[in-house]
Image (spheres, rainbow, N blue to C red):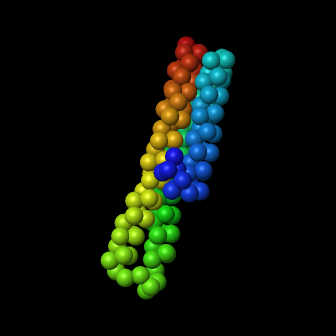
Amino acid sequence: METFKMCGWPAWVILLFAIMGLGLAALGFLLALLKKPLGGAIVGGVAVLVSLGSIGMGPVGAMRGRAVTDDALSGDYIDASQKAKIREMGYAEADGCKDVGLALGSTPLFASLGALALGLVLHSRKKD
């Protein structure tokens, strides 16, 4: 939870994408199992993209955090040794966004891939 707080607003975007990806994956499974496998595959594919967006927001949040740290240290009011320590701590906190993105986005990604695969398999069987 502490890493989630340090990430800031990108963590909320990551969470939103993860929830949307999980919901779309569930819809993809449902469609595939309700005899609409092509629809399930399409929704599963969209869910994969949304889930990848969740994972991709992690590095975006890390870059934003590093930029905020650099902006805070841009003045000459802090001596060099303190700047180095603050920059190191700020970058470490910013890199926590990558962990948040990976942690929250991996489950929806795997579920989405499953929905996509199920839809494609059932659609190919339906043709036969």
Number of marks in the rendered image: 0
Q: State whether residue 113 is above or below residue 11.
A: above
Q: State whether residue 44 is above or below residue 35.
A: below
Looking at the image, the residue that sits furthest to the left is 81
**Would you say residue 56 is visible in this rendering?**
no
**Would you say residue 80 is visible in this rendering?**
yes
Looking at the image, the residue that sits furthest to the bottom is 76
Q: Residue at x 62, y 45 (%)?
A: 16
Counting from the top left corner in percent of width and height, residue 66 is at: 45, 66
Please indicate whether residue 13 sits to the left or right of residue 70 in the image. right
Please indicate whether residue 78 sits to the left or right of residue 38 in the image. left
Counting from the top left corner in percent of width and height, residue 17 is at: 60, 44
Q: Residue at x 58, y 21 (%)?
A: 123
Q: Which residue is drawn at 60% across and 51% down?
A: 13
Q: Quadrant of the C terminus?
A: top right
Dividing the picture into quadrants, the one containing residue 119 is top right
Q: Which of 34 and 100 is in front in this view?
A: 100
Dividing the picture into quadrants, the one containing residue 30 is top right
Q: Residue at x 47, y 41 (%)?
A: 103
Q: State whether residue 89 is above or below residue 77.
A: above
Counting from the top left corner in percent of width and height, residue 50 is at: 58, 43
Q: Which of 118 and 20 is in front in this view?
A: 20
